Each structure stands twice: as C-alpha cells, then as structure tokens.
Amino acid sequence: MTRVFDSELAELKELLLYMGGLVESMIHLSIKSLVEREESVGKEVYGKENEVNKLQIEIDDRCLKLIALNQPAGTDLRFITSAMKINSELERMGDQAINIADASKELLKFSQLKRLIDIPLMADISKTMVKDCLDAFVRADAELARSVLVRDNKVDGLKDQIFRELLTYMLSETKHIPVALELILISRHLERIGDHATNIAEDVIFMVEGQDVRHYQKDVR
C-alpha cells in the first residue's frame, strides 16, 4: 500500500480516538449531572451528541472509500472493517449517555433517595473500558482488549447489586418506586456501555489475531 493509504489509516485512528473521547466526556457529564443534580451539566451531553453523530457518518464514509479505492486485504482490511464496527459501537454508547442524561433530568423532580456510590463506580469502570478498548485498537494490543472483557463482569455484578438494593427501597415504600426505577434504568444504560466496549475489545482481538471470541468469552476472561 502507498504512503497516502498509511496516512489515511492514521487519520482514521485519530478520528476514532477523538470520537471515543467525546463519548467518554458524555458519560462523565451525564453521571455528573445525576450526582450533582445539575440540569445545566446534562445539557452539555446533548451538544456533544450532534458531533458524535456527524463523526459516525464521516468515519463510515472514510472507511468505505478506503476499501473501494485501495482494495486492502489481510490485516489492513480487518483494521478498516473493525473501525466501522467500532464507529457504530461508539455512537450507541453516546445514545446511552443521552438516556442517562434524560433520566437524570427526570430525577430532579424528586427528592434524592440515597447517596449514590455504585452508579458512579459503574460509570468510572465503563469509562476506562471505553478508553482501553480504543487504546487496544490503536496499538493492536490483544491483551489490553482481553482486560476489557474481564472488567465487563464487574460492571454486570454492580448492576445486579444496584437492582437488589433499590428493590428493597421499592418494597419498603411505594413512594420510592419512581426514583428507584430511574436509577435502575441508569444502571442498565451503564451496563450497555460496558457491553459496547466489550464488543469493541472482541473486534480488536479479531483484528490482531484473526480469532473470533464473541461466543467463547469464557476462554479469554
């Protein structure tokens, strides 16, 4: 392949990293809005969504042109097809952050039920999963990608823990049900972000090793 092609691949990496940074920021701001009960912070998430959506279109367009004009094979083809999948996963993460911002806004109508501990922890783990799966992609680091798969179990465990705790609140008094349900939904949105990061990590392993681990995760965790 030509130097121009290599340069275009490098630009593609940078765009994906930039998009990933926006998504990390959206997750951070949506949880900050929840914890600090600040609607103005949540509004920042909506502004970033527009940029993420525009990037998704641009990245898909670049990938298709790279394939059409250069007819790559082997590792280069796996890289570009993985980039297209990652692009889609990042956009979906942005959607989940929007859902969290929406729920945080809804919760402002109610008194705070409890001090939030596990949900911010879930968010922190999810953000590091997003960062590390993208770093693994750029560095072609299958081992880092595998570490993301392991952390998905932690996110799932926290979601179950949050559900059990909030269920006790709902059973104790019916007035707690609306708030508890919104918090349960937020935990599910965070779980989905973890799932999307896991999907990216699986794509990285395939890109680097040519091994499809989607249905064999017990072997890599």
Image: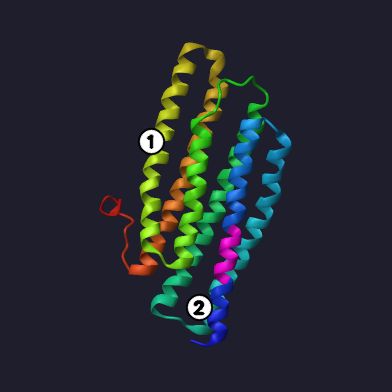
Q: Amino acid at mark 1?
A: Gly
- Helix, strand or loop at label 2? It is helix
Residue located at (38% from left, 53% from top): 147
Report the coloring of the rendering. rainbow
Sequence-first tag of 2 and 1: 2
Q: Amino acid at mark 2?
A: Ile
Q: Which residue ends up furthest to the top in the rendered image? A: 173
Q: How many marks?
A: 2
212 sits left or right of 118 in the view: left
Is 142 situated above or below 157?
below
Residue sitting nearer the eye, 64 or 90: 90
- Helix, strand or loop at label 1? It is helix
Query: Magenta region, mostly helix, strand or loop?
Result: helix
Q: Which residue ends up furthest to the bottom in the rendered image? A: 2
Q: Quadrant of residue 210?
A: bottom left
Q: Which residue is mark 2?
A: 67
Decide whether residue 16 is among the magenta residues.
yes
Q: Quadrant of residue 116?
A: top right
Q: Which residue is mark 1?
A: 157
Looking at the picture, how far across and down is residue 212, in whole percent? Answer: 32, 62
Is 152 situated above or below 188?
below
Residue sitting nearer the eye, 26 or 56: 26
Decide whether residue 89 is among the magenta residues.
no
Q: Residues within 10 Å of mark 2 (few under 14, many from 20)?
A: some
40 sits left or right of 160 in the view: right
Residue located at (33% from left, 68% from top): 209
**Magenta-drawn segment:** 12-19
